[in-house]
Image (tube, helix red, strand yellow):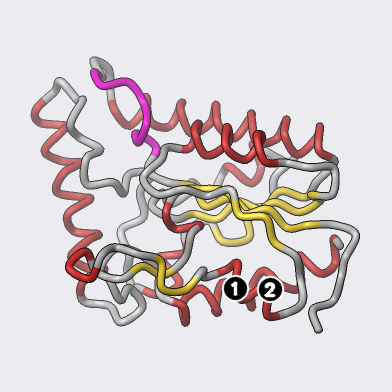
Amino acid sequence: MRRKFSSLIAIAGDSWGCGEWAPPDQGSIVTHTGLQKHFEDAGLQVLNASKGFIGNAEALNLLQDKLTPAVKTIVWFVTCALRGTSKTIDQDPYEYGLQCLKDNMRRAELIAKNQQANFFVIGGLCDIPDDFAQCFPGLRFIVPSSCSLFIENYPRSIFGDVTAAQGITNKNLAGKITNLVGSKHDLFQSSEWFPDNYHLGRQAYYKLFKLLLPYVQSKI
């Protein structure tokens, strides 16, 4: 019988928060709920507010819409810094993306404060810069780059969405980001940890779960 706790764990983010997905030719359906399933198997209660192909701002919107007073632990899978932002980017996309990311981190800190919750941030399609741990003390950056756990010499970057470069007016910079993101996805395709070549598989989520569990249990 599943243990009952007075508090809930909320999972937020894009499709990485939903779990393992079948390949597109098999219907692109969730075949295992990833971190949610592993937490539930450990007897914890989970509220999943994640949704496929959304940006960080929308992920935080969905999280806020679903939060209840019982949620005292939040796990957020951070996606590409440019996903869900302006269609046209006339400035340096690196600086623009970094600013968008920082704005969302400040908002996450506010959610954590208002909810009186412990807020764990996981790098998904975004690899979170190392200095964010000092810049945002209201958040816990246990796994700033989950891909780096599974792929040797992974090219860490705040960009990870294949459509990230579409709104960049500078063709040279757009090309650099396209090549960077493409190199990441080439590595996904060569790794057994990404069964659909785009999302983590259940065994990878189990490794994340084992890393997070001691921190989560200490906060319940």
Q: Which residue is identified by label 1?
A: 37
The amino acid marked with disc number 1 is: Lys
Measuring 57% from the left and 37% from the top, which residue is drawn there? 62
Quarter of the rendering containing residue 154: bottom left
Residue 80 is one of the magenta-drawn residues: no
The residue lying toward the viewer, choosing from 64 and 212, is 64
Left or right of 112 in this view: 187: left
Residue 59 location (% of width, % of height): 52, 39
Left or right of 85 in this view: 145: right
| Quarter placement of the C terminus | bottom right
Residue 100 location (% of width, % of height): 45, 27
Decide: few, some or many residues near mark 2? Use Cα within 10 Å; few <14, some 14-19, many ≥20. some
- Note whether 85 is above or below 143 in the view shown: above
- Note whether 77 is above or below 204 in the view shown: above
* Number of numbered discs visible in the structure rendering: 2
The amino acid marked with disc number 2 is: Glu
The residue lying toward the viewer, choosing from 138 and 51, is 51
Q: Tell whether label 2 touches label 1 (CB within 8 Å).
A: yes
Q: Main secondary structure of the magenta part?
A: loop
Residue 162 location (% of width, % of height): 22, 46
For the residue labelled by badge 1, is the local secondary structure a helix, a strand or a loop? helix
Measuring 15% from the left and 33% from the top, which residue is drawn there? 174
- Note whether 46 is above or below 203 in the view shown: above
Disc ID at residue 40: 2
Q: State the separation of the CA atoms marked 1 and 2.
A: 5 Å
**Magenta extent:** 81-88
Residue 82 is one of the magenta-drawn residues: yes
